[in-house]
Image (tube, grey):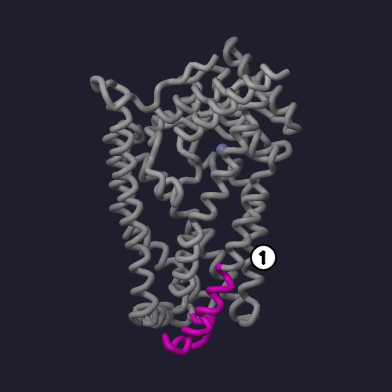
Amino acid sequence: MLNFVPIESSATGPETSGDRDAERARAYARVKFRLGLFSAGLDLAILIWLAFSGASLVLSHELQIVLGRHNGPGWLVMGYAVVLILGFTVIGLPFAISGKVIERRYQLDRQSWAGWLGDELKSLGLELLLGVAALELIYALLRGSPGYWWLWSWAAFVGFTVVMAQLAPVLLLPLFFKFRRLTGDTPEESELIARLTRLGERAHAPIHGVFEWKLGEKSAKANAALTGWGATRRVIVSDTLLQSSTPVEIEAVFAHELGHHAHRHIPKGIGLQSALWLLGFWLSAQALQILTPRLHLQGVSDIAGLPVLALVAMVTGLIFMPLSNAFSRRMERQADDYAFSTIGTAGPLVSGLTKLAQRNLAEVSPPRWKEVLFYSHPSIARRIERAKHWERAQGQGKLQA
Ligand SMILES: [Zn+2]
């Protein structure tokens, strides 16, 4: 039988610790949401200012002077990209610091400021490397094929995303976190390895190792994932999850991850993303074409037009966010259903998710509009409701059989 942890206590009756937890989660969600909104709003305002005030023209002109003899188009793109990325990093710094202060106040953050700064610098290094490479490619295509640059750029983006979707967890995650292969030294560990391996084989996703993800030294939050491909396909389970959950609950959370694999959600997600990018690139090309004379750009491949490209990309992403989130929530529901039927009961996933929500201070039942617009996962309350529904349907099935 299911033993659901009460997620919303009754309105009457004395205040319970559940009420306080829910209020804390709501307050945390509220303050994080506002911070994200301010940060995105500021980015948007700066891009608009750069694009339409003439500031971008001044910047590219100044860069040409600074670069001196090296002011060929490739150097100029690199210089502009570096200034833009560094500028946005500096402007975003107060938000990043506030984010960390908030996480600390809610006892979710455990990393020292020095460690945090190190991680921020690593992220910045990666951003510079990938950002400059991407912009060099886009601008080389803009110069070489002004009519079809958007199509070639899109194809390159999709190719890169397909490769990185597989490699990023294996290549990039270890830059920020330590991992330890579970060897099954304790009975609990070997039970967990056996359960996860068995589940992977059943889903035709043989896994090569279960790894403890050392998240606990940086955060109190918990997480688990199925990452990599072929010989690198592995399960990573955060130490925080290992400490707070039973093997049965972790198995259920992992079964959900396998559901994504079984339903081929990664390729499907990339498919939708690619379609949106194609639209975004095409719209950028149109915007650049129309605005080039009005903004006094020397041509579509003038680097001073970059804020226009970034603006169109950001606005397209924002407009289609509800659509891609709806798509994502649908996939999450499918993965939950897969977990229920693979395990044969909804209870372990429900208790696993409830514990995850408590640890991560997730808002259990956020306002509906917020979920529709911004949530990539259904709210915990909805997922639990669906689990109960599944259990009831099973019970009826058994009665009819
Ligand atoms: Zn999922």
Q: Position of residue 328 (x, y in %)?
A: 56, 47
Q: Image check: 55 left or right of 390?
A: left
Residue 223 vs residue 364, the one in the foreground: 364
Q: Quadrant of the N terminus?
A: top right
Q: Position of residue 108 (x, y in %)?
A: 35, 33
Quadrant in which residue 396 is drawn: top right
Q: Image check: 205 left or right of 179?
A: right
Label 1 crowding class (10 Å Cα cut-off): few <14, some 14-19, many 20+?
some
Q: Which residues are magenta?
A: 280-302
Q: Most prominent secondary structure in the magenta stretch?
A: helix
Quadrant in which residue 25 is drawn: top left
Could you tell me which residue is drawn at 60 percent across and 75 percent down?
140
Q: Position of residue 294 (x, y in %)?
A: 43, 88
Could you tell me which residue is drawn at 29 percent across and 40 percent down?
102
Q: Image check: 218 left or right of 352?
A: left
Q: Position of residue 240 (x, y in %)?
A: 45, 25
- Residue 43 is one of the magenta-drawn residues: no
Residue 381 higher or lower than 173, as above or below: above
- Residue 290 is one of the magenta-drawn residues: yes
Could you tell me which residue is drawn at 47 percent across and 82 percent down?
69
Residue 279 higher or lower than 70, as above or below: above
Q: Which residue is mark 1?
A: 155
Residue 345 vs residue 358, the one in the foreground: 345
Hey, what amino acid is under mark 1?
A: Ala
Q: Secondary structure at mark 1?
A: helix
